[in-house]
Amino acid sequence: MNLRSLKFLSNLNKVNQQFAVIGLGRFGRAVSSQLHLMGYEVLGSDVEEKLVAQVLNEKHASHAIQLDSTDPIALREAGIFEFDTVIVAIGNYLEESIITTLNLKENGVKNVIAKASTEVHGKLLDRVGADRVVFPEHDAGCNLAHSLTKPAILDRFDLDPNHSIVEVLVPDEFHGKTIAELQLRSHYGLTLLAVGEDEGRFEINPLPNLRLNRGAAMVVVGSNKDIQRLPIE
């Protein structure tokens, strides 16, 4: 059984969303490609024709078009204002990134996620209305640190800087014990959301008498400090 294929968190809120990715550099292509592989409808766009052609040739998106995202008319004609979520992946061109984000929010896009290259860039994106600002290099560094120190964590979703939902392998210390016996909330300050052993199947809100087995997966939510106290390597 390949436990990594369970990917409980990756399957949460799987709805018929549509995404637009503006900026098809390495970060934009990676986001577009992953969303496309997950089965979502993705429209990629960039001002550079060669990047658009690359995305189309390598099938990193459902569709890709060339446009200047600082031009609201071009965005409207492309239908980008109608998308559920738009990712602004223009990290290295501050003015274009800010104007694009502003265009999207002023024209009613509900969820705009923007890439920032510096702290100042991030603050400016916040000011013009970005719903979420991401720092890919910082996030990649944090994820690497987590994977090096806690490889038993299979998947992770950060709720805020201090709290997360994580999918982890059941530790050896928990093997053969029931959920009631473990008392995760009183001993670790964590809430158990789900337990899974069969590939792709999880038992949500499991009963207290469920017995955990070594190598299975469990999903917990709590503070990062408490998650670090779990007896996992």
Image: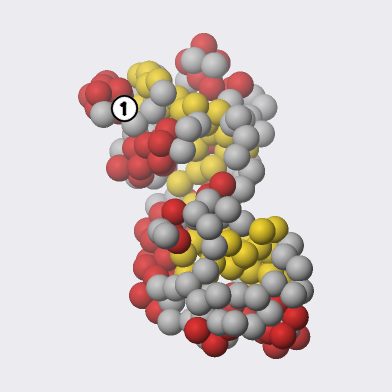
| Outermost residue toward the top in this view | 77
Of the residues shown, which amino acid type is indicated by label 1?
A: Lys
Expressed as whole percent of the image width and height from the top left, the position of residue 78 reads 49, 15
Using the image, determine if residue 89 lies above or below residue 103.
Answer: below
Mark 1: few/some/many CA within 10 Å (<14, 14-19, 20+): some
Q: Which residue is mark 1?
A: 59
Left or right of 91: which side holds 219?
Answer: right
Expressed as whole percent of the image width and height from the top left, the position of residue 10 reads 53, 50
Left or right of 68: which side holds 185?
Answer: right
Which residue is more in the foreground, 4 or 52?
A: 4
Residue at screen point 76% across, 74% down: 208
Expressed as whole percent of the image width and height from the top left, the position of residue 30 reads 35, 42
Residue at screen point 60% across, 40% down: 14
Using the image, determine if residue 72 lies above or below residue 94.
Answer: above
Residue at screen point 43% across, 76% down: 150
Quadrant assignment, res 13: top right
Q: Is residue 195 visible?
A: yes
Q: Is residue 184 visible?
A: no
Residue at screen point 59% across, 31% down: 17
* Tag 1 secondary structure: loop
